[in-house]
């Protein structure tokens, strides 16, 4: 029965992917923006989103927080339905001269780098950007439990993103191997990580992912932030930061907890700029 259930679910997902491809990027995105706010508000995740918004923005009114939640649901719906159109969406993305120059410098150095992103706008685009701008990259991702769906997603993502490293027990080893090979390693670091240090996020301690800082400490690789910003008309803007000056301890090594807190501050700033484009449904502060 389990095998049959996995086959059935995989077939359903493939059918949905086929429908979204047939709709094209604009109509697929619009469909997600229409459905997600209407369905999402009926789930317990909407309560999580509102609780998170009350914690993050205590000075806003409940109506203002509800408006942010609606926009966040619409963004989630768009991002989900845009999944099969990532290559086409990248062609609509813009980046300033500074971001292009930073990518060029990374490529020219031939050295490994660490790049963090957050669940903002379409959070798959930063990985596509690195690959399309000629930067050999490896991406940490969370693999679905259904092995058929997982295989389909790898087939969809690897040609446009580079090497994919599934999250799991072997992930730290594979991430270290990627850096040893001189690849740029990208990861989303804005969700709760139960075994990580509790550092401030919107002024409240939150268990945070320390892997980026640990790898920076071990390999001495430069650390950059890369974000996508959703713009009107189905367009996006991509921004790559300068390499960060990470905090260091008395021995001159990267201070993992302080560096993790620094990354949190940067992501918090991104979220404050475009609060309706972040994934508020995640229980970040539990």
Image (cartoon, rainbow, N blue to C red):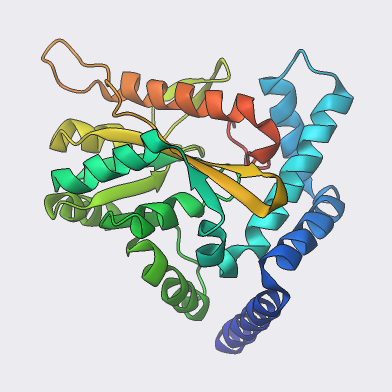
**Residue 17, how many percent across, how many down?**
63, 77
Left or right, residue 126 beside residue 78: left
Q: Position of residue 200 (x, y in %)?
A: 49, 19
Q: Report the residue at 82% width, 50% height from top.
A: 37
Q: Residue at x 32, y 23 (%)?
A: 259
Tell me which corner region of the image, top left, top right, bottom left or bottom right, holds residue 220.
top left
State the image coordinates of residue 104 (x, y, percent, origin top left).
Answer: 26, 44
The quarter of the picture where residue 196 lies is top left
Quarter that holds the N terminus: bottom right
Camera-side residue: 82 or 236?
236
Instruction: In this rendered view, identify the residue nearer to me: 186 or 21.
Output: 21
- Residue 76 image position (x, y, % from top left): 68, 51
Residue furthest to the top in view is 250
Position above or below: 62 against 251: below
**Direction from residue 207 to residue 35 in the image, left or right:** right
Whether residue 133 is visible here, answered yes or no, is yes
Q: Is residue 280 visible?
A: no
From what the image shows, is residue 131 above or below residue 224? below
Residue plotted at (55% across, 87% down): 3
- Identify which residue is drawn at 54% across, 25% down: 268
**Above or below, 144 relative to 222:** below
Q: Tell me if 188 is positioned left or right of 165 in this view.
A: right
């Amino acid at each position: 029965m389990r095998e049959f259930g996995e086959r059935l679910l995989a077939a359903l997902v493939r059918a949905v992917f086929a429908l979204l491809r047939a709709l094209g990027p604009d109509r697929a995105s619009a469909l997600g923006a229409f459905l997600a706010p209407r369905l999402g508000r009926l789930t317990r995740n909407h309560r999580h989103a509102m609780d998170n918004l009350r914690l993050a923005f205590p000075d806003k009114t409940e109506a203002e927080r509800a408006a942010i939640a609606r926009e966040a649901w619409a963004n989630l719906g768009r991002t989900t339905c845009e999944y099969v159109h990532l290559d086409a969406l990248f062609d609509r993305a813009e980046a300033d001269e500074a971001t292009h120059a930073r990518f060029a410098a990374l490529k020219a150095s031939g050295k490994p780098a660490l790049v963090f992103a957050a669940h903002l706008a379409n959070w798959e685009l930063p990985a596509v950007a690195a690959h399309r701008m000629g930067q050999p990259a490896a991406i940490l991702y969370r693999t679905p439990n259904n092995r058929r769906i997982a295989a389909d997603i790898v087939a969809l993502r690897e040609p446009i993103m580079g090497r994919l490293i599934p999250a799991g027990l072997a992930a730290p080893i594979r991430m270290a191997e990627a850096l040893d090979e001189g690849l740029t390693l990208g990861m989303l670091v804005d969700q709760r990580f139960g075994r990580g240090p509790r550092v401030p996020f919107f002024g409240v301690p939150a268990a945070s992912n320390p892997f980026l800082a640990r790898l920076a400490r071990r390999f001495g690789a430069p650390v950059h932030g890369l974000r996508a910003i959703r713009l009107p008309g189905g367009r996006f803007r991509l921004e790559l930061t300068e390499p960060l000056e990470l905090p260091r301890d008395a021995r001159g090594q990267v201070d993992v907890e302080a560096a993790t807190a620094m990354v949190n501050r940067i992501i918090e700033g991104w979220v404050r700029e475009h609060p309706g484009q972040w994934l508020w449904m995640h229980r970040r502060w539990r």
